[in-house]
Structures are given as structure tokens and as C-alpha cells.
Image: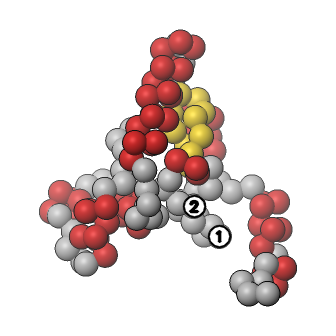
Amino acid sequence: MPIYGSLTLRARILANDEPAWLKKHARRDYIVQVHLATPRWYSRKEVVRLKQKAHELSKAKRRKYVLDHIIPLTHKRVCGLNVHHNMQIIDAGTNARKSNHWCEWHGELFAEPEQFPLFR
């Protein structure tokens, strides 16, 4: 899994100046979404650290472990951020089954938005 999160590429996407390789990429929509979900305070160092930890766990357990976004980046109800706080290490099979699903009970948290006023 490549580590997506280039702030330079994010700026190009926002400026409608996508590189040619991205326009032709099979996973273009996902890559664009990841970059749009990457804030300026993104820590590549922390994501690399998690990725290395997943690699070490894979070697130790002889089973593939990957980084997973806890709150999906592509979902009709939510959009998580591409930051290490929103990532967990899980085995590849669980990640494939999870896909971009969001537990329905999480939706209840947002059923009545007035519960969470922006200003008090």
C-alpha cells in the first residue's frame, strides 16, 4: 500500500492541475479523495511509523497486516481524515471485508445535529 498524502499533489488537485499519471490511474478517484482528506498538519512520519509497525507485525505473525482508516474516506455519510489518528493496523482479510463500511449505530451520533452546537 503506497502512502498517500502529498500536500503538493493535494494543492495541484485543488487547483485543477492533476498530473497526467493521475488522470490515467485505475484508482484515480480514491487517490484524489485521500489527498482531499489530508489536512495541512498531516504527519507523514507518523503514518510511515504505523506502516513499518504493520510490516513488522506481518513478519512476526506470518499474516498480512495493513493500515486501515477507522472512519472511511469514501462513504456517503462520513468522511474521515487521512491522518495517523484515524488509522489502525488490522489484518488484510478483515480490511477487505470491512471495505468502506460504517457501522450503522455510528449514524445515531449524528441523528440530531442540534445535540452538538457549534457555538454555546
Tag 1 secondary structure: loop
In this picture, residue 36 sits left or right of residue 8: right
- Residue under the point 25% across and 62% down: 8
Q: Is residue 59 above or below residue 42?
A: above
Q: Position of residue 66 (x, y in %)?
A: 51, 33
- Residue under the point 31% across and 61% down: 7
Residue 77 badge? 1
Q: Position of residue 75 (x, y in %)?
A: 58, 64
Q: Is residue 30 above or below residue 117?
A: above
Residue 30 visible within the image: no
Badge 2: how crowded within 10 Å, few (<14), some, or many (20+)?
Answer: some
Residue 58 visible within the image: yes
**Quadrant of the rendering where the N terminus is positioned:** top left
Circle 2 residue: 80
| C-alpha gap between disc 2 and disc 1 | 10 Å
Residue type (three-letter) at the residue carrying disc 1 = Arg
In this picture, residue 102 sits left or right of residue 76: right
Q: Position of residue 39 (x, y in %)?
A: 44, 64
**Quadrant of the rendering where the C terminus is positioned:** bottom right
Q: Is residue 47 above or below residue 18?
A: above
Q: Quadrant of residue 102?
A: bottom right
In this picture, residue 16 sits left or right of residue 1: left
In this picture, residue 38 sits left or right of residue 115: left
Tag 2 secondary structure: loop
Tell which of 97 and 40 is nearer to you.
40
Q: Quadrant of residue 117?
A: bottom right
